[in-house]
Image (cartoon, rainbow, N blue to C red):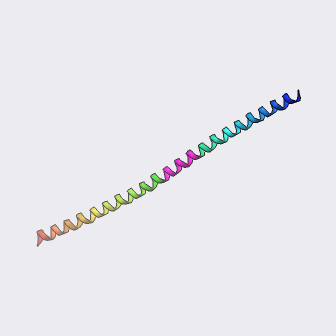
């Protein structure tokens, strides 16, 4: 009788540990997915900043080139 009780107790203990381990693995997987999302978000944000500054530089360069060309053309027409 005592052996059966201890065996049932061992089985319950094993099942409980298995359930805890399963929950732990699920939590670790969820945390890993969240870290991946955060890294991806940071990388996208960094790329967006670089593209924005490149766009800003290109617009400024276009403004300078057009202004210089306009004044050169005006000086050529007046001169």
Farthest residue toward the front? Answer: 3
> Residue 48 or 37: which is nearer the viewer?
37
Left or right: 23 in relation to 76: right
Left or right position of 49 against 32: left
Total numbered circles: 0
Quadrant containing the C terminus is: bottom left
Residue 31 in the image: x percent, y percent?
A: 60, 46
Q: Quadrant of residue 63?
A: bottom left
Q: Is residue 8 left or right of residue 19?
A: right
> Is residue 39 a member of the stretch shown in magenta?
yes
Q: Position of residue 46 (x, y in %)?
A: 45, 56
Q: Which residue is found at the position 27% from the left and 66% from the top? A: 64
Q: Is residue 50 above or below residue 34?
A: below
| Snapshot quadrant of residue 56 | bottom left
Location of the N terminus (image quadrant):
top right
Magenta highlight range: 32-42
Q: Eyeballing the image, is 10 above or below 33?
A: above
Q: Is residue 1 left or right of residue 74?
A: right
Q: Position of residue 74 (x, y in %)?
A: 15, 68
Q: Nearer the viewer, residue 16 or 66?
A: 16
Residue 54 against residue 23 in the figure, above or below: below
Residue nearest the viewer, comparing 79 with 45 = 45
Identify the residue at horizontal 19%, vertical 65% (top origin).
70
Q: Residue at 49% across / 50% down in the picture?
A: 41
As drawn, the residue found furthest toward the bottom would be 79
Q: Of helix, strand and loop, which mostly describes the magenta segment? A: helix
23 magenta-colored: no
Residue 23 to residue 8: above or below = below
Q: Choose between 40 and 60: the one closer to the eye.
A: 40
Coordinates of residue 71 in the picture (x, y in percent): 19, 68
The residue sitting at 38% across, 56% down in the picture is: 51
């Amino acid at each position: 009788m005592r052996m059966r009780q201890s065996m049932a107790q061992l089985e319950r203990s094993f099942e409980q540990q298995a359930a805890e381990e399963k929950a732990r693995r699920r939590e670790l997987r969820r945390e890993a997915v969240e870290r991946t999302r955060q890294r991806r978000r940071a990388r996208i944000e960094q790329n967006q900043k670089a593209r924005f500054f490149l766009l800003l530089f290109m617009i400024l360069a276009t403004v300078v080139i057009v202004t210089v060309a306009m004044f050169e053309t005006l000086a050529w027409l007046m001169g």
